[in-house]
Image: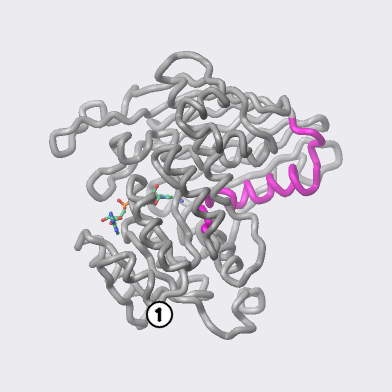
Amino acid sequence: MLTTENPHWQSGRKPRLLVVGTGMMGREHLRVTQLLGWADVHGIIDPFPDSAALALAEWRSLTGEPLAVYRDVEEASRDSEVDAIVICTPNHTHFGILQAACVSGKPILLEKPMATNLIDAVRIVTLAKEYPACIQLGMQYRYKAQYVDALHEIGVQGTLGAVKTISMSEYRPPFLDKVGQWNKFNTNSGGTLVEKCCHYFDLINVVAQSRPRRVYASGGRAVNFLDFEWQGTVSDIDDHAMVIIDYDNGVRASFTLNMFSQELYEELVVVGERGRLVASEQASFRSGMPSSAHLQVEVPGHPAYRAVRVGYPDWIEQSGHYGATFFEHVAFNQQLSGIAVDAATPEEALWSLIVASAAQHSMRVGSAVDISKFCYQEGIGEAFEAG
Ligand SMILES: NC(=O)c1ccc[n+]([C@@H]2O[C@H](COP(=O)([O-])OP(=O)(O)OC[C@H]3O[C@@H](n4cnc5c(N)ncnc54)[C@H](O)[C@@H]3O)[C@@H](O)[C@H]2O)c1
């Protein structure tokens, strides 16, 4: 199946990737590239020797192919051996690294969130408009099995009729250890709702099919990392939030985050004129615990009226993020061959960031945030007007 669907099949040539940042996510990209087999990884860059060494060791366990190790992003990106670039470094480095990689004019897969602030996010959108190749954003939750099916039912099949309400939630354990503990500080991550929840705001925006008009959020720091210090600085990240979003077309949405749960549970509930859809996933950070995802479509006569199990084959699910990264690479390879895909664009990533940033602002000021005013206040009024 994979051989015939390989978009590079006719050219007979595998594109060669450069992976910038080989921490947890960079190594997942290396693994998935090998597993899919449509592209090769030509080289990596990571200034932290342990990350580079771990990536090289994992690479050798996967393949006998060589892996170049570069030091400079601009130079590596320009190398004629490199066809496309995957950026998976900490959030606060995305904009600078993207600028360096863009001198190459080559296709780029940029991890989420695109940036830690809205000004840089808008700069990326502007840059992407003039850029000669694709810039795909790493909002790969779109490719989790239950959301692929949900988006198909809602957007393509129109099963629910006009969507009226959307409720999304994530319950999960605390943020994991990262290299230099960058994710324990808002200045590096952009804040919890930006870092973690841009995935969910992206999904909610896609289902709503409209622009957010007003956001209210309540949340803060209850349990996690309250006394955590790294190199003399105390952690300041939030661990829970409840967010309400009103859309221009009248759709109402809510999002709940809790990061002091033992296990992972995600749920999307969408209700339209004709019925209710529930897409859910029970998973665990404990090794050896498989995830279990379900789709339920309470519309008379629908075959999934009672919940049905959805998912990918185990070998795909186990490659990372329950198979979503694998299908993100399928989409990226398709883009490399000029095939249009449903991967997140820079504009869509910006709108997920606008909701996340407005929610964080609402938590600080304690009142609802008008998105139009907020965008002007943040210096991105023109981007808001451009829609
Ligand atoms: N799509 C998803 O679901 C998902 C999941 C996890 C992480 N991410 C994103 O992936 C990115 C990386 O996260 P992670 O979990 O791998 O973090 P990590 O800390 O495990 O790894 C980051 C790596 O980047 C390296 N790095 C730092 N500055 C660099 C630079 N200038 N050039 C090259 N390498 C550099 C670090 O040394 C480290 O090895 C983040 O943006 C994160 O939000 C996305």
Look at the image and tell me whether residue 306 can be seen: yes
Q: Check the image and report above or below for 99 versus 57.
A: above
Find the magenta span and give its range: 135-163
Q: Where is residue 105 in the image (x, y as percent from the top left)?
A: 47, 67
Is residue 142 located in the magenta-colored stretch of the structure? yes
Residue at image location 54% in from the left, 23% down from the top: 373
Q: Check the image and report above or below for 195 versus 142.
A: above
Look at the image and tell me whether residue 323 can be seen: no
Q: Check the image and report above or below for 234 versus 328.
A: above
Q: Which amino acid does label 1 sit on?
A: Glu
Residue 98, picture quadrant: bottom left
> What element does badge 1 sit on?
loop
Q: Where is residue 92 in the image (x, y as percent from the top left)?
A: 33, 45
In front: 53, or 102?
Answer: 102
Is residue 283 located in the magenta-colored stretch of the structure? no
Q: Position of residue 299 (x, y in %)?
A: 81, 36
